[in-house]
Image (cartoon, rainbow, N blue to C red):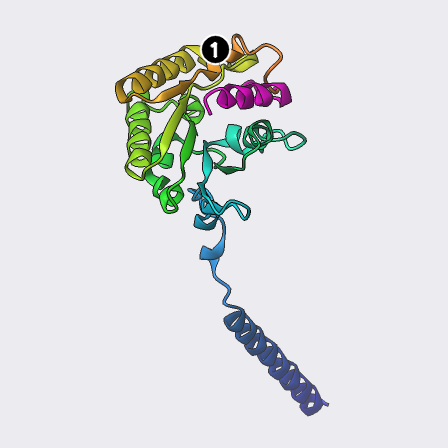
């Protein structure tokens, strides 16, 4: 009896080892790697998104217009609505490449700007700074990071267009002093660099009726307001 039980236990252990070996082989073949997860500092899109397009009827080459920004550009805060680049595209009848990255700051965007310049976009719409305000970044540094973006776009043969950031409402209105400070730096940067400025903040005024309940993302009407503001500069 004891000999039979020992034999049974031995067979069970052998099967368990076999299962473990097969599992290890399967993981090795599938190339399971923790590094394949999402990055905490995502790159804003892929190179293929920004490209030259040839008009099939005229043969002329059109370089892209790129919208570079944060979640206000992606439109992800209001999934039931369209992003401002999508609305702007319809207004002007031309494709707008959306290169927004949720949560990105001006300096992270500055460090990643090369990724949108490899195909030399014709125009880059720059709407950044809200996350710098929210995260209490040094706004003087934020201004210099925006300056680097402007200069890099120009060096690549593109036209940068700066925009002020929208106001904050509700509970977030306590940050309006910083919003105004950031917008002051954006105004002065546009003047110093001779860059076209779209004054989104002026179009929004107090922001009443134009913001989501979080107080810093535009709602559908606010997003349309941004699209019309940029359309006037294109």
Count of numbered badges drawn on the protein? 1
Q: Relative to residue 221, is residue 24 depicted above or below?
A: below
What residue appears at the point 69 percent right and 88 percent down from the top-left corner?
A: 2
56 on left or right of 177 = right
The location of residue 32, given as percent across then percent down, is 51, 64
* Magenta stretch, residue numbers: 213-234
Is residue 17 shown left or right of residue 234? right
Locate residue 63: give its quadrant. Answer: top left
The residue indicated by pointer 1 is: 202
Disc 1 residue crowd, few under 14, some 14–19, many 20+, Cα 10 Å: some
In the image, residue 47 above or below residue 185: below
Residue 20 in the image: x percent, y percent?
57, 75
Give the percent coordinates (x, y) of residue 70.
Answer: 47, 31
Task: In this rendered view, identify the residue nearer to me: 227 or 81.
Answer: 227
The residue lying toward the viewer, choosing from 9 and 65, is 65
Closer to us: 7 or 68 = 68
Q: Is residue 109 magenta?
A: no
Q: Is residue 126 left or right of residue 156?
A: right
Please tell me which residue is depicted at 54% across the width and 48% down the height of the picture. Answer: 56
Tell me what residue is drawn at x 55 percent, y 46 percent: 57
Counting from the top left corner in percent of width and height, residue 7 is at 66, 89
Q: Secondary structure at mark 1?
A: helix
In the image, residue 7 sits, relative to residue 165, either above or below, namely: below
Q: Is residue 217 magenta?
A: yes
**Pick the front one: 122 or 151:** 122
Residue shown at 39%/19% (left/top)?
197
């Amino acid at each position: 009896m004891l000999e039979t039980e020992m034999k049974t236990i031995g067979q069970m252990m052998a099967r368990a080892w076999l299962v473990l070996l097969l599992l290890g082989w399967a993981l090795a073949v599938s190339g399971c790697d923790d590094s394949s997860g999402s990055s905490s500092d995502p790159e804003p899109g892929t190179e293929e998104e920004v490209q030259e397009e040839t008009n099939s009827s005229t043969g002329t080459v059109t370089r892209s217009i790129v919208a570079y920004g944060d979640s206000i550009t992606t439109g992800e805060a209001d999934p039931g609505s369209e992003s401002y680049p999508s609305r702007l595209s319809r207004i002007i009848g031309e494709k707008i490449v959306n290169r927004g990255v949720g949560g990105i700051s001006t300096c992270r965007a500055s460090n990643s700007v090369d990724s949108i310049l490899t195909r030399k976009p014709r125009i880059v719409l720059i709407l950044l700074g809200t996350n710098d305000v929210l995260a209490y970044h040094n706004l003087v540094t934020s201004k210099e990071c925006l300056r680097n973006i402007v200069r890099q776009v120009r060096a690549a043969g593109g036209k940068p267009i700066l925009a002020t950031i929208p106001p904050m409402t509700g509970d977030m209105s306590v940050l309006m002093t910083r919003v105004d400070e950031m917008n002051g730096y954006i105004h002065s940067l546009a003047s110093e660099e001779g860059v076209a400025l779209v004054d989104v903040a002026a179009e929004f005024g107090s922001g009443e009726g134009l913001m989501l309940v979080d107080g810093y993302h535009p709602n559908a009407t606010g997003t349309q307001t941004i699209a019309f503001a940029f359309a006037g500069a294109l």
